Amino acid sequence: MIDVLYFAWVRERIGLPKERVETSASTVADLVAELSAREERYAAAFADISALRVALDQELSSFDAPLAGVREVAFFPPMTGG
């Protein structure tokens, strides 16, 4: 089981701040594919992953990163300066 967290507009599109997911995904990209196949709201949230960032156990990562041993995956839009 992996905790999946959603922030900003990702949270708004999916309608959840977080959930526990049972997955057989081996990479972040595989997890995104599994989630996108669930329902339209997930497909909409992950339609353009170039507009997303991902963190594994609170460390910025990439979509081809392995999920082995990971407890938490967070998806969020790029941070903007201000």
Image: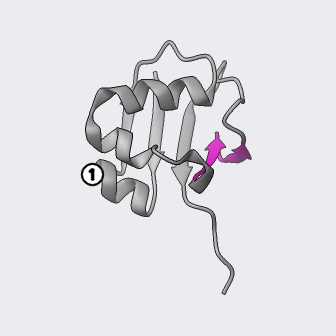
Q: Is residue 4 left or right of residue 50?
A: left
Q: Nearer the viewer, residue 82 or 72?
A: 82
Can residue 80 be seen here? The reply is yes
Q: Is residue 7 magenta?
A: no
Q: Give the range drawn in magenta.
A: 52-61
Q: Which of 18 and 39 is in front in this view?
A: 39
Q: Where residue 58 appears, x then y in whole percent? A: 65, 47
Location of the C terminus by quadrant is bottom right
Q: Which of 71 and 67 is in front in this view?
A: 67
Residue under the point 64% across and 45% down: 55
Q: Which amino acid does label 1 sit on?
A: Gly
Q: What is the magenta segment's predominant secondary structure?
A: strand
Residue 12, by quadrant, is bottom left
Residue 56, by quadrant, is top right
Up the image or down, 31 lies above or below 23; here it is: below
Q: Mark 1, residues whose alpha carbon is within 10 Å: few (<14), some, or many (≥20)?
A: few
Up the image or down, 17 lies above or below 66; here it is: below
Q: How is this picture coloured?
A: one colour
Residue under the point 39% across and 32% down: 36
| Residue that sits furthest to the front in the current view | 48
Q: Where residue 28 appears, x then y in whole percent? A: 60, 30
Residue at which label 1 appears = 15
Q: Where residue 46 appears, x then y in whole percent? A: 46, 43
Q: Which of 44 and 3 is in front in this view?
A: 44
Q: Where residue 21 appears, x then y in whole percent? A: 40, 26
Can residue 16 be seen here? The reply is no
Up the image or down, 32 lies above or below 49; here it is: above
Q: In this view, does 40 lie to the left or right of 37?
A: left
